Amino acid sequence: MSERIGKQKNTLEVAQKLSTKTRFSTDECRSLLTIHQRIAALGKVDRLRFREVLHTAFDITDDVMLDRVYRVFDKDNDGIISDHEWVEGVSLLCRGTPDQLIDFCYMVYDINGDKSLAREELSHCLKGGLVPYAGVMNGDEIEEAMREIVEIGMKKLDRDKDGQITQPDFTNACYYDPLLLQSIGPCLPPARSLAAFMAIFTENYRSYSTEWNDEWKEQQRRVELGENPLQIDRTFSKDKTSTSSVLVVGRSGAKSKPQKSKGRKKSMSKNYK
Ligand SMILES: [Ca+2]
Ligand SMILES: [Ca+2]
């Protein structure tokens, strides 16, 4: 009995600590720790176990993305997703700010971790996206189509045309067109599975997206009134190749709301309703 009470106390302390590092409350962290304990009770949360969790709970299905998301969750690179890594990673997936989500996707795509995305990395991340279907495409055609898709990706994301996509390149491109966030691979949970997962342990599984929408509307209103406090990246707004014509918002503003997103476009928040 005393052992159980000790364990509960320990979980509470860990949850309190994690709540200061994540966007979850202590209660939410405690619930997530319990979920981790249940997962870990069946065996170590290693690559294969965690791929199952990502697949079933978050509906991430792309083979390459499953491995890459696992690598990004495993911050200390020991092959196991610890309880801390679990809560911090889930916090990002569920309630990450636009900046955090952009950084997360970039880390997922940057396979060798050199802060640059090369053609080879795009090609590797995208390879699950094209499959032969009922003889419609053969191997050569897929290879050719893949080369074209990689070139389109480079064109949209490599802003300074040096053959590498740096993190600022990627960040600016995503702010300009949020659809580019997962353009190299589906590594974030779809809205429906995210809400279903969050409903297990919190009543606030929709409140965050509301907060985003409100903030986005507020930014839009200020722009319309000419009060935009954010730095607009004018070089990007001139880019006619983008699929989006909405406002470009830089990262340097919005200091009055440090805990919230620094500007977000409608189509980005749509995914998290
Ligand atoms: Ca680890
Ligand atoms: Ca790289």
Image (cartoon, rainbow, N blue to C red):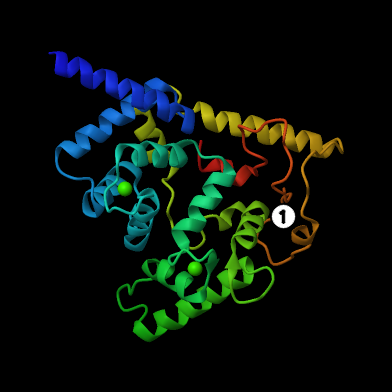
Is any part of residue 228 visible from this angle? yes
At 43% from the left edge and 56% from the top edge, which residue is drawn? 186
| Quarter occupied by residue 13 | top left
| Residue at 50%, 66% in the rendered image | 114
The picture quadrant where one finds residue 131 is bottom left
x, y percent for residue 192 = 41, 39
Question: Who's the residue at 73% across and 36% down the image?
Answer: 219
**Above-or-below relation of 61 to 227:** below
In percent of width and height, residue 124 lies at: 41, 71
CA neighbours of label 1 inside 10 A, class few (<14), some (14 to 19), many (20+): few
Q: Reply above or below: 95 against 159.
A: above
Q: Seen from this angle, which residue lies furthest bottom?
A: 140
Left or right of 68? Residue 253 is right
Residue 222 lies, in percent from the top left, at 80, 34
The type of residue carrying mark 1 is Ser
Q: Residue at x 60, y 77 (%)?
A: 163
Report the quarter where the N terminus lies.
top left
